[in-house]
Amino acid sequence: MSEYVIDSNDVCSMVLVKLLRIWRNASPGDIVVVRTPWEGAASELGKWCTETGNTFLSVQREGGRYVVRLRLEGKFT
């Protein structure tokens, strides 16, 4: 199992593009950690997980940033 980190000041669309790039090369069970100031990160990434069959693990606030943890459950198709 690998852990990937997206540390970004970008908002929705760029975070999702970066997440998709990781998912293409990741394996089931890999973890993605997204660090962003984007307020909607938890809500939008939670929806993304529901739509794609991946797992939303947690969200925390650290130093004015949201830290969202996701587990990739399948391969990108």
Image (cartoon, rainbow, N blue to C red):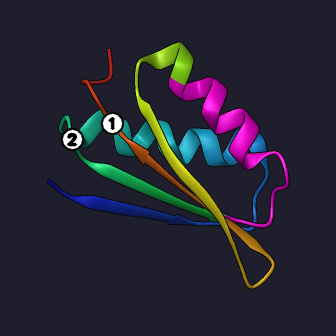
Left or right, 15 with respect to 58, comes to right
The secondary structure type at the circle numbered 1 is: loop
Left or right, 61 with respect to 70, comes to right
Marks 1 and 2 sit apart, C-alpha to C-alpha, by 5 Å
Residue occupying the point 70% across, 45% down: 42
Q: Which residue is mark 1?
A: 72
Residue occupying the point 81% across, 57% down: 38
Task: Tell me the quarter of the image containing the C terminus.
Answer: top left
Q: Which percent across, then down, holds residue 52?
A: 46, 18
Residue occupying the point 20% across, 34% down: 28
Left or right, 2 with respect to 51, comes to left
Magenta-colored span: 36-49
On whether residue 23 falls in the magenta region, the answer is: no
On whether residue 40 falls in the magenta region, the answer is: yes
Q: Are marks 1 and 2 in contact (CB under 8 Å)?
A: yes
Q: Amino acid at mark 2?
A: Gly
| Residue 62 vertical position relative to residue 35 in the rendered view, above or below | below
Q: Which residue is mark 2?
A: 29
| Magenta portion: prevailing SS class | helix
| Residue 13 vertical position relative to residue 51 in the rendered view, above or below | below
Q: Amino acid at mark 1?
A: Leu
